[in-house]
Amino acid sequence: MNIVVIDYGLGNIKSIKNAFEALGVEVILSREKEAILNADGVVLPGVGAFSHGMNNLIEYGLDDIIREYVITDKPLLGICLGMQMMMEESEEFGITKGLGLIKGRVIKIPVHQTKKIKLPHISWNEIKVKSVDWEDTILEDVPKDSNMYFVHTFIAKPYYKDNILSVTEYENVEFCSSVKKDNIYGCQFHPEKSASMGLGIIKNFIKICKKLK
Amino acid sequence: MNKTRIIARVDVKNEYVIKGIHLEGLRKVGDPNEMAKQYFQDGVDEIIFMDAVAAYYDRNSLTHIIERACKDVFVPITVGGGIRKITDIQIALNAGADKTAINTKAVQAPSFIKEASEVFGSQCIVSSIDALKIGPDKWEVYIDNGREPTGLDVIEWAQKVEELGAGEIMLTSIDKEGTKKGFDIELNQRVSEVVSIPIISSGGAGKGKDVANVIDKTDIDAVAIASLFHYKIETVKSLKEFLVNERKIQVRL
């Protein structure tokens, strides 16, 4: 098994590495084209601003490498900003283009911010089934309404319902909390920080990588 | 309904977890990695490690403790104490931390919060505010782990750090800290009225009821707990069960 976590200077990649290692899988932290294209599975992490993330990807030529990797149909897992960057564009600090792997945009959580309704959304929150069956996905066997750890102000809004793997509700706003398109997966929450339920998702991702190897 | 986060606060000095009263008179209570692992297994939502003497001695020594903790703790980890440069934050994040808590340096140079949140994102930056009550409805900001008064008003400072880009506030009542006499409800409510970023309430939890009260009576988002867990008055699990079953408070079980 050969899993690469893309190291582009953003995000808590050590935690992702630790999570895979706790499940008995070594990962490589890399931004090298060869390592990424030869991987059985790739993780795109990320926290912080969308434009900052995209700029770093572009600077290292990783945008094209990721698109090339995806054509091979091997599994990709985006986490938090990593998932958001899979979309076509984001409205964070003006419009910034994303990787365009999944049709849709990234928008600010449409709540009216008051002293009681807070942003960022930093909380454990439930993931729920929307229209896509979780079987054979990274959410397989994850109990419905499991709590995951979220920390974000923006959300991905996929154009096609079929790409919405789970939804979550924050202050009466339902948003897409994970995406799926073929073997491309993304989680708005942090599975590597979501205790045993989160590690279960990473375990499923490893299983999918093994199966497609 | 949002779930209130139950956070274990682990203050560290020279490799040991310590606990004092009013941030003073520190006593050794255990090994930070063992305790963090136990709290994780018991279902804690986050862990905050604070270097209790870092600001005082001008250093930060938690890195290897964080590295070890991140191998068996899979919930968010915050590191605080002695964060005074952008590279200190980078080192903490590289060690596996998700967020850093900043107090002294923010007061000395408020632009540090702005710079740090621009570089790492607001979600990485917790503004740690140590508050001492100095009059009716008035609290003063203290730095250097509760040793130095600053002349700053807590309510104004909380608004200022939000404006500068802090993603959360950890609000510690020095008056209540370590006393196990309950939270400073008034302080927590006043600060949560003036900011719209999440607030972690710290200082004073002596029993489950204290935790329930600060959650019920104020608009805080998380509670940081030390003594209650360190002295095994409650486990994370027993506390959460009490909050859910007895007080109908939403927490992650």
Image: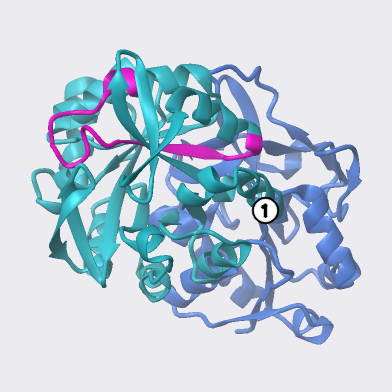
Q: Is residue B133 above or below residue A208?
A: above
Q: Up-down: is A91 above or below B48?
A: above
Q: Single out the residue that lies furthest toward the top.
A: B136
Side of B200 where A59 appears, left or right: right
Q: Is residue B167 magenta?
A: yes
Expressed as whole percent of the image width and height from the top left, the position of residue A111 reads 65, 21
Q: Residue at x 29, y 49 (%)?
A: B8
Residue at 45% across, 22% down: B192
Check the image and report above or below for A120 versus B111: above
Residue A134 in sight from this viewpoint: no
| Residue A137 counted in the magenta span | no
Residue B123 placement, left or right of A62 = left
Q: Where does the C terminus of chain A fall, quadrant-wise?
A: bottom right
User: Label 1 crowding class (10 Å Cα cut-off): few <14, some 14-19, many 20+?
Assistant: many
Q: Colour of chain B?
A: cyan
Q: In the image, what residue type sits under mark 1?
A: Gly
B236 horizontally vs B119: left or right? left
Q: Is residue A69 above or below residue A95?
A: below
Which chain is represented by blue in the image?
A: A
Residue tagged 1: A186
In this orientation, which residue lies closer to the viewer: B70 or B230? Answer: B230
Q: Residue A80 at x, y = what percent? A: 64, 51
Residue B190 placed where, x, y %?
A: 41, 17
Start and end of the magenta stretch? B164-187
Q: Is residue A147 visible?
A: yes
